[in-house]
Structure formats: C-alpha cells, structure tokens
Amino acid sequence: MGLPQLLAAAEAGFPTVGIDIDTTVTDRINRGVSPEVDTDPELLRQMVAGGRLKATTDFDAVCDSDCVVFCVPTSWSPEASPDLSAVTSAAREVGRRLRSPKLIVLESTVPPGSTREVILPLLEAGGLAVGSDFCLAFAPERLDPGNTSFSTLDIPKVVGGITPTCTALASRFYSRLTIEVHPVSSPEVAEATKVFENTFRFVNIGLANELAQVCSSLRISPREVLDAASTKPFGFMRHSPGPGVGGRCIPLAPRYFRWTAQRQGVGSKITDAAIAVNDRRPELVAKETVARVHEALAGQARPVVLIVGMAYKPGVGDVRGSVALTIASLLKDAGLRVQYHDPFVPTIAIDGERLASLPLTEDSIRSADCTLILCPHDEIDYEAIKTHSRCVLDPINMISSGLQRDLPS
Ligand SMILES: NC(=O)c1ccc[n+]([C@@H]2O[C@H](COP(=O)([O-])OP(=O)(O)OC[C@H]3O[C@@H](n4cnc5c(N)ncnc54)[C@H](O)[C@@H]3O)[C@@H](O)[C@H]2O)c1
C-alpha cells in the first residue's frame, strides 16, 4: 500500500523516499521494477530515473523529511488481539529522529484509539509535543488492489488529526494527492471509519454466503437471485458469495471491530456471526469438493483437482491470506492431488510442495477429475472450463450453467 502513495506524492511534485525493512523491496524500487501488479511500471521508472523517488532501509531518511507517512502492515495475533508491532517499531524509529516541525500520518488499518494511545506516546518520547512541535493524524489507506477503476487520486481521503492544526496540515498535504479530502473531528473517527467500511463489506459477504446456503437447499441459483435484486435502483448493494474472505485487509477489520466492541463492553453480534459464517467457508468448500469427487469417481486412488484462481482476490498475484491456499491444503490432507491455474501466480508452495501454474487448455482441464473455481480473475477462460471439465465446483458462481452446484449449509 505504501508504493502507490509514494508514487502519488512523487507525481504531485514532492521528492519522496520509501523506507522498508526488506532490501528486496527497496532494491526493486530503486531499479524501477514494481513489486505490485497494479502499480504503473512506466510511472515508477520515470519517477526513479528522474530522481523524484527512491527507496532505502535507512530510517535516517526521516531526518530530512517534512512529512512521514506510515503504511506498514498490521495484523491479528495468534493471541486474538491486534498486532501493531510493525507500526510501533516504525514509530519508535521515527520518534528517535524526530526534530520539529513535521507532519506524521498513520495510514495502516488500526483499532480506533491507536493513533492517540499507541503511536503518539512513541513520538512524544523525545520530549516534543504534538500540535506545537509536530503534527499527527490518521488517514486510512482505502485502495483496493486489482481495482483498475479507482486509484489513489480517485479515492477521497478521510483525515483526522490529534488537534485541529494537525487535521488542517494533513488535509493540505492530501489535497495535493487526491480528488477530495474529508476532514473529521479526531483520529478515532477516521480509524473507526476504516474499520467500519471494511466490516460492512465483510458482514455483507457473510450475508451473501448465507444466501448461497439457503439457495442450495431451495435448489435455486444465488447468482440469479443477486442479478434480480441488483435491478433495484436504491437500497441494495450487491455482495457475492465465495469460498471465504481472504487477504490481510478485509478479514482484519471485523476482528478489530469486535475487539474494540469488547473493550468498550458492548456487543458485536452481527460481526461475530459474519466471522463465524465466513471462516467456515473454506472447510465447507473443501468438504464438498472431496465428497463430489469421490461420488463421481467411486473410490479411484488420488483423484486430481484443478484449482482455478489461487490469489486472494481477482486481478492480483498476492496469495498472502488466500483461502485458496487453505482449501488446497485441506484437499491434499484428504488424499486428493492438487493442480492449479492462475494467470497472476506462476508458482506456489502448498504444505512444502512447490507447484507451477498449468496453462488452462483442453488437456489440462480434461486431465483433472474436478475443476474448482476459487478466484474470479477476468483473464480466465470460463467457457473452456464449462466445455471441457468433467465436473465443476463453483462456490463463486462464475459459471451459470447446469454444471454449477452451490455449497450445502
Ligand atoms: N492490502 C490491502 O488490500 C490494503 C488495503 C487498504 C489498507 N491496507 C492496510 O495498509 C497497511 C499496509 O498493508 P500492505 O498490504 O501494504 O502490507 P504489506 O504486508 O505488503 O507490507 C508493506 C511493507 O511494509 C514493510 N514493513 C514491515 N514492517 C516494517 C517496519 N517495521 N518498518 C518499515 N517497513 C516495514 C514490509 O517489508 C512491506 O514491504 C495495513 O495496515 C493494511 O491493513 C491494506
């Protein structure tokens, strides 16, 4: 998420430096090679060649900067609490080098209250005071990787500073990078906005998954229901069922939301239910696939499943947190042989076994006992799957034909 921001700032005329702890990332950027599929490679090359953008592992770059933006990862710890260790580590590095005046912005997704309670003390540790010596704001990263319709420039930026001066300065900075700035009264409002908008998406995907289960019992197509409901010009926003919610952004927010609700002593029953429904999907998909393959093959040893789409979402090659990986692993545990096709993921390791993406040809489709569609990349030839597959499992309803079968409840 940091690179698109860096490019937007460089394009707006700011000399920019990207700090990362991973030298493979900084080396690639300094060579003008984008690590991301949806970063414009030509723009990156131009900015690097023109000296407007460079990358380093050295936090001393902070000393010469007027503005520091944190885009480091945040996650959910195995102890069932927010893991903000990358944010706190980066904030400590910046805090040590903080000389006024500076604008500091946190963009990483965090539970409401984190900018004030977690980041501010680390920045003030050297004796400087927010509002007078430096400014601090939260402005969530709202990019949608793989979505070519909206870039950094097109997405309004929500900005909440610790003080009104912090909000005003951060808003001035972002007005150079985006189409619209939406200032709010505090970092907590901006943090809650981000957590809520992702939780909204997660909960509605859960509802769509529940619809798929009901439709399966009724023997009707959820896709047909959603197509019909989407004709309503108001009051309905389409969300689709799927094999689970992957990646490291959308599944994170509902956990932060629930954690915050618990800390405040209030309930989060709708979010809890959505987490339960969505988290169960990969296991349901794997079970249904195993049952379907065995039903069709009557006990043949090591049937082959061809998974179509390994990435965590369409249009990207990122497999971190992908539910396809979980499902592939469950299928292997159940004794099935797994092959895959993904135009964005050339190779992958599943439980230590390295696999390469197969071309999606008549031969590769026919040689599998079952095709399982898990990630709806536009680039996939669904007609070829429909025509040549011996059996298709389609939890994302990409193929609306007699081959389609929805998951049981
Ligand atoms: N990926 C998304 O779809 C998305 C969308 C909107 C918001 N976000 C949020 O944006 C933030 C960043 O997400 P991401 O997907 O870019 O994360 P990421 O895991 O890709 O990490 C970004 C970079 O941070 C570097 N890094 C890790 N620890 C560091 C440290 N202590 N100091 C400096 N660099 C460090 C990593 O090496 C990596 O190159 C997260 O909070 C995420 O929730 C993500």
Image (cartoon, rainbow, N blue to C red):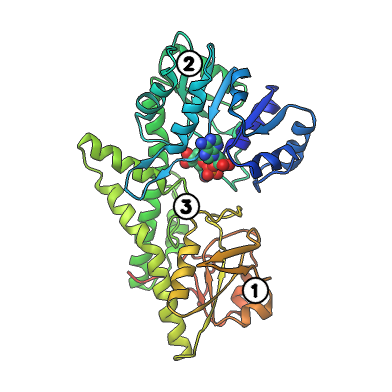
Task: Identify residue type, mark 2.
Answer: Cys
Q: Nearer the viewer, residue 383 or 71?
A: 71
Left or right of 257: which side holds 194? right
- In-front residue for pair 137/180: 137
Regarding residue 265, the answer to whether it shows in the image is yes
Q: Residue at coordinates 39% horizontally, 46% vertically from top-left?
A: 76
- Residue 383: x and y in percent read 63, 71
Q: x and y percent of residue 118 in the render?
A: 37, 28
Looking at the rendered image, the quarter that the N terminus falls into is: top right
Q: Amino acid at mark 3?
A: Thr
The residue singled out by tag 1 in the image is 384
Task: Calculate the distance from the C-alpha at mark 1 to the C-alpha at mark 2.
Answer: 56 Å
Viewer-side label of 1, 2: 2
Q: Pick whichever of labels 2 and 3 is earlier in the sequence.
A: 2
The quadrant of the image that shows the C terminus is: bottom left
Indicate which label's residue lies in the foreground, 3 or 1.
Answer: 1
Q: Where is mark 3, residue-wise?
A: 231
Label 2 crowd (10 A; few <14 / some 14-19 / many >=20): many
Nearer to us in this view, 282 or 76: 76
In the figure, 158 relative to 391: above or below?
A: above
Indicate the quadrant where residue 62 lies: top right
- Check the image and report above or below for 136 versus 370: above
Q: Is mark 1 within 8 Å of ligand 1?
A: no
Residue 64 sits in which quadrant?
A: top right
Q: Residue farthest to the top? A: 132
- Can you see residue 144? no
Which type of secondary structure does the marked residue at label 2 adopt?
strand
**Distance between the alpha carbons at the discs numbered 3 and 1:** 29 Å
Residue depicted at x 40% and y 33%: 193
Residue under pointer 2: 135
User: What amino acid type should be assigned to the residue bearing mark 1?
Assistant: Ala
